[in-house]
Image (cartoon, helix red, strand yellow):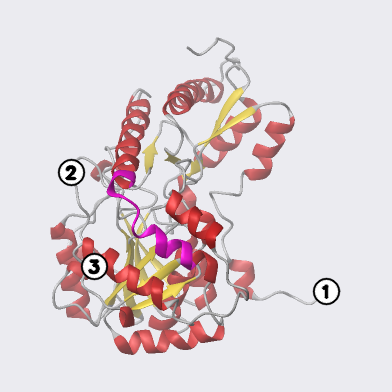
Amino acid sequence: MAPEISERAQKVQASPIRKLVPIAEAAREKGRKVIHLNIGQPDIPTPDRMLDAIRRFDEKVLAYGHSAGLAEYRRALVRYYARHGIDVDSENILVTIGGSEAILFAFLATGSVGDEVIVPEPYYTNYDGFASMAGIRIVPLTTRAEDGFHLPAMEQIESRITDRTVGILFSNPGNPTGVIYTREEMEMLKSIALQRDLFLMSDEVYREFAYDGDTPTSVLHLDGIEPHAIMLDSVSKRYSACGARVGCLVSRNQSLIASLMKYAQARLCPATVEQTAAAAAIDTPDSYIDGVIAEYQRRRDICHEGVMEIPGAVCLKPKGAFYLVAKLPIDDGDEFARWMLESFHVDNETVMVAPAAGFYGTPGMGRDEVRLAYVLEEKTLRRAMRILRKGVEVYNQERGGREPTQEKTAMK
């Protein structure tokens, strides 16, 4: 008889992004090619400056760094944020082990066990895991595909507030939706935070990825909210460096930063080599970022056009990040994603999507939606969207009681 694991561990949600990986592996073992639209792993090359800094690292001892992050990197971040109209100094910045630790630290510092944080849904699914670790309860605020996943009215947001509410957390640009909140929406959140004395936590990992001339409003662009505002950030997507695991938490609330330093000291320090590389990446030429934005905007257009060619699909064109959530004419996104991997292919190729239900906190929501990550080069992405469209058609034919159809026509 084995000891019982904790209730917290039992309740942590399996990742909707990764839970179908064994099924995808089984499809590959059968010789099938799986095109991955399920995970936000960029294929854009990491900047040379970042990789060169790793190659040049020649310290004789790989020693502990400062718990708040290397001074060199924090100074570089001050310059980076200034370019985006965000005025902070080094003392406002705590470097973390990826954006993941920044989110966990934010939960640990703002709420006690049993407290609540309001999060617009669908949301980055790992918020659930970090909330469970901190003993925080996420209170979902539903947004709709038909509205482009913009925020509902202030009254609806305020209706979620209880005496246990400590803050509002959101991503902007949004993962998984690609929404960019308007300045008016950000001012509304500011008003609620000030009136109800809440923390306003903004996950801004996808800051650069804004299309059609749009520019996201940072929580640190808002005046008069300094004690309430917490910004969460990471190099993972900006520099196509997901494996570097360097993030940060930024706030002008120095009492908050001082409290977080206790957690930072307990885990000693972030990775030294990766911080050195991240500091070098700050001076990456604008041409790199401009090229990345242009490339993702092209991919966004291909992905959105492909979705809209599916009869009955609902998806307003997203403004940012490199994801979209599409409402499809299917009965169950989990079953559909599994079926695509196990039972469907076009010329021995199939597509892996992320069922969107796992990005919702409200039971039953998102069952007819999937998240797509447009992180593939154009030719592969176009082929993937044609396979997806055919997959929806055949899936519904089978569910309608007709004879199963296997597509064997070459895709051109």
Q: Nearer the viewer, residue 357 or 172?
A: 172
Q: Nearer the viewer, residue 325 or 286?
A: 286
Residue mark closest to the camera, 3 vs 2: 2
Which x, y percent locates residue 78? Answer: 29, 71
Type of amino acid under label 3: Val
Of labels 3 and 1, the one closer to you? 3
Q: Residue at x 26, y 47 (%)?
A: 210
Q: Quadrant of the N terminus?
A: bottom right
Magenta extent: 275-288
Residue holding disc 1: 2
Residue density around tag 1, few if under 14, some if 14–19, many if 20 or more, within 10 Å: few
Q: Considering the numbered disc 1 on the image, is that residue within a helix, a strand or a loop?
A: loop
Camera-side residue: 342 or 251? 251
Of the two numbered discs 1 and 2 in the rendering, the one whose residue sits closer to the viewer: 2
Q: Quadrant of residue 115?
A: bottom left
Front in this rendered view, residue 385 or 272:
272
What amino acid does circle 2 point to? Gly
Image side of residue 404 versus residue 197, left or right: right
Identify the residue position indicated by label 3 in the image: 219
Q: Secondary structure at mark 3?
A: helix
Q: Earlier in the sequence, mark 3 or mark 1?
A: 1
* Dot 3 crowding, Cα within 10 Å, few <14, some 14–19, many 20+: many
Q: Residue at the right extreme?
A: 1
Whether residue 134 is visible here, answered yes or no, is: yes
Q: Position of residue 142 (x, y in %)?
A: 32, 56
Q: How many marks?
A: 3
Determine the image quadrant of residue 109: bottom left
